């Protein structure tokens, strides 16, 4: 079973020093080791650190990019939080 993260836990990892987590389609990715490799530059990843980057990701990438990097960068899933 994949590790579960809350949105608050992801937000706590909003910088490269803290792990630079991002959310894409309810999956959590650890991007700190990928920042230097990102073809669009480090600035873009740093801007979305700790946040849901789904909209930005799909605007510039397709499914093949996800498949290429998912196994290496995905660390878990976003935990569902009950809304009372």
Image: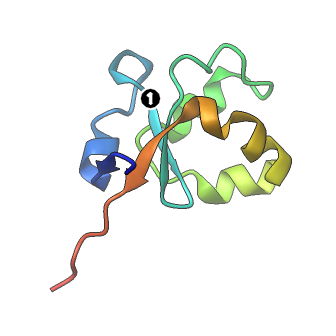
Q: Position of residue 21 (x, y in %)?
A: 44, 36
The residue depicted at 61 percent of the width and 57 percent of the height is: 54
Q: Is residue 55 left or right of residue 84?
A: right
Outermost residue, bottom side:
84
Judging depth in this view, the residue of 44 and 27 nearest the camera is 27
Outermost residue, left side:
84
Q: Is residue 1 left or right of residue 82?
A: right
Q: Is residue 74 above or below residue 84?
A: above
| Residue that mark 1 sits on | 20
Q: Is residue 60 above or below residue 20?
A: below
Which element carries disc 1, helix, strand or loop?
loop
Task: Give the class, few, some or many, for how many residues have Cα within 10 Å of label 1's Cα (few <14, many ≥20).
Answer: many
The residue depicted at 26 percent of the width and 44 percent of the height is: 9
Toward which corner of the image does residue 40 lie, by quadrant? top right
Inspect this view and state whether residue 62 appears: no
The residue depicted at 81 percent of the width and 48 percent of the height is: 61
The residue depicted at 50 percent of the width and 21 percent of the height is: 32
Toward which corner of the image does residue 45 lie, by quadrant? top right
Q: Position of residue 23 (x, y in %)?
A: 49, 50
Q: Position of residue 11 (x, y in %)?
A: 32, 43
Q: Is residue 16 above or below residue 83?
A: above
Q: Position of residue 3 (x, y in %)?
A: 34, 45
């Amino acid at each position: 079973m994949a590790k579960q993260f809350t949105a608050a836990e992801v937000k706590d990892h909003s910088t490269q020093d803290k792990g630079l987590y991002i959310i894409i389609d309810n999956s959590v990715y650890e991007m700190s080791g990928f920042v230097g490799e990102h073809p669009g530059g480090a600035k873009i990843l740093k801007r979305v650190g700790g946040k849901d980057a789904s909209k930005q990701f799909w605007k510039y990438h397709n499914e093949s990019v996800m498949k290429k990097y998912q196994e290496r960068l995905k660390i878990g899933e976003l935990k569902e939080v009950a809304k009372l």
